[in-house]
Image: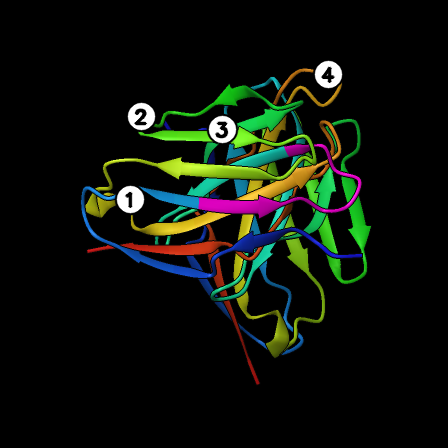
Amino acid sequence: QQQVKQSPQSLIVQKGGIPIINCAYENTAFDYFPWYQQFPGKGPALLIAIRPDVSEKKEGRFTISFNKSAKQFSLHIMDSQPGDSATYFCAAKKGFNTGTASKLTFGTGTRLQVTL
Amino acid sequence: DAGVTQSPTHLIKTRGQQVTLRCSPKSGHDTVSWYQQALGQGPQFIFQYYEEEERQRGNFPDRFSGHQFPNYSSELNVNALLLGDSALYLCASSFSLYEQYFGPGTRLTVT
């Protein structure tokens, strides 16, 4: 049972382009949505996260858009650079507000390649 | 400030053997979660430890067990290794329920 669906599986953009990665979730109890960046042979690194009480969050060149009614959220990378080439994972978590134990449920990942 | 550290970096074991992986959380963090990441897949939650107790568990068999020590460090033990256990094992630490920060992982190969 895949609770977080991520697309596309892979993406190639030119330098300066704006890759967009989409995720959809099923469980309305999720209340925290982080994005992670992973380089080959490394652990995932937290990029940016959003709570469902806001529709957009920006940190540097990274922006999350959140649509609570559609149960979808997406990552936009502005002015993409070759150094952004990595695998990106969306994730979801519940219990942020309730103080209960909570695991991260990950999407299947998007392999991004930024070409010169 | 050291981040999450894991040891060993790589490990090769034979089917049927047992393995122990170790994790030291980021300074100030009290919660450790373990994930298994198969090649080309997203991390899958194994279990989470808080105050030396297993607080939540994913869909993994009892062959997977863990421990958290008073200094918040943690171990993951896997018994009776199967070929399918070959994966990158990730440890993530957090302060209580907040953001989880991942270590570099331990690459386990079962032959």
Q: Which mark is residue B85?
A: 1
Up/down of A42 relative to B26, above or below: below
Judge by depth and name the residue closer to the eye, B22 or B105.
B22
Q: Name the image quarter holding the N terminus of chain A.
A: top left
Name the colouring of the figure. Answer: rainbow
Q: Residues within 10 Å of mark 1 (few under 14, many from 20)?
A: some
- Residue A60 included in the magenta stretch of the image: no
The first of marks 2 and 1 along the sequence is: 2
User: Disc 3 residue type?
Assistant: Phe
Res A63 seen here:
yes
Q: Could you tell me residue B81's position as x and y percent?
A: 24, 41
Q: Which residues are magenta?
A: B21-31
Q: Nearer the viewer, mark 4 or mark 2?
A: 2
- Residue B27 included in the magenta stretch of the image: yes
Same chain letter for marks 3 and 2 = yes
- Residue under numbered circle 3: B47
Marks 3 and 1, Cα distance to the nearest angstrom?
15 Å
